[in-house]
Amino acid sequence: MRSENESDGQKRRSFIEEARRAQIVASAVEVIAEIGFAQASLARIAQHAGISKGVISYHFAGKDELMVEVVERTYGLIAETVGARMQGLSSATELLRAYLLGVAEHMRGHRTQLAALGEIFIHLRGADGRPRYGIKANEEIYRALEGIYALGQESGEFWHFDRRVMAVTQASAVDNMFAYWVAYPEHDLDAHARELADIFERACRS
């Protein structure tokens, strides 16, 4: 018999609860992308979802917790897309290209999510008043990229550069690619991603 509690001791949510949370997150994304973080009150999000504000308060402790859920769910979907694209690949060069092209492939169909993430990253603050998603929030991304670089360096595909410097550079390039695409919707995101993959492949290759 499976426990009704999660591994961290929290009660497992029902299918209906998960569906409701997903609905609230989806509405939050739409509202934030349309009117911005500051104007996206729980009341506005509830109105968009066709529910009462109390329903949101039942599932989330407040706006900050909801915003964190938006980020975590969005990044989870990106990870699924990128992971599927990388599955079965063995060389560091293939993995590097799959990572860059996979992220772009996913976000190309989720421009609204991208706009909402941008608003959250700029405006959401932690208890200390600093941005909740500052540079330190990228640590997981840096480590994932460093894993690809390490594989390439060990196999001789890549030269022995500083992996953290390259990871920060690549992550920044991807962030700016998306920022540019949001500002200029007519920009060819796929072509930009391919060019970026070429640049980093040449930069890493031994």
Image (cartoon, rainbow, N blue to C red):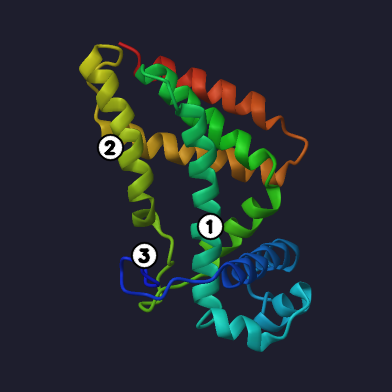
CB under 8 Å between callouts 3 and 2? Answer: no
* Residue at image point 51% right, 66% down: 69
Q: Is residue 47 above or below residue 188?
A: below
Q: CA distance from mark 1 to mark 3?
A: 28 Å
Relative placement, left or right, of 194 versus 127 is: right
The disc labelled 2 sits on which kind of residue? Arg
Relative placement, left or right, of 71 versus 137 is: right
Q: Label 2: few (<14), some or many (≥20) within 10 Å?
A: some
| Residue that label 2 marks | 164
* Residue at image point 43% right, 18% down: 94
The front one of 108 and 130 is 108
Q: Secondary structure at mark 2?
A: helix
CB under 8 Å between callouts 2 and 1? Answer: no
Quadrant, the N terminus: bottom left
Residue 90 is situated, as x and y percent measured from the top left of the image, at: 36, 18
* Mark identifier at residue 156: none
Please name which of the two marks, 3 or 2, marks the residue nearer to the observer.
3
Please name which of the two marks, 1 or 3, marks the residue nearer to the observer.
3
| Nearest to N terminus: mark 3 or mark 2 | 3
| Residue that label 3 marks | 1
Residue 140 is situated, as x and y percent measured from the top left of the image, at: 34, 48
Q: Is residue 187 above or below residue 53?
A: above
* Mark identifier at residue 73: 1
Q: Secondary structure at mark 3?
A: loop
Residue 144 figure quarter? top left
The disc labelled 3 sits on which kind of residue? Met
Q: CA distance from mark 3 to mark 2?
A: 45 Å
Residue 159 is situated, as x and y percent measured from the top left of the image, at: 26, 16
Q: Secondary structure at mark 1?
A: helix
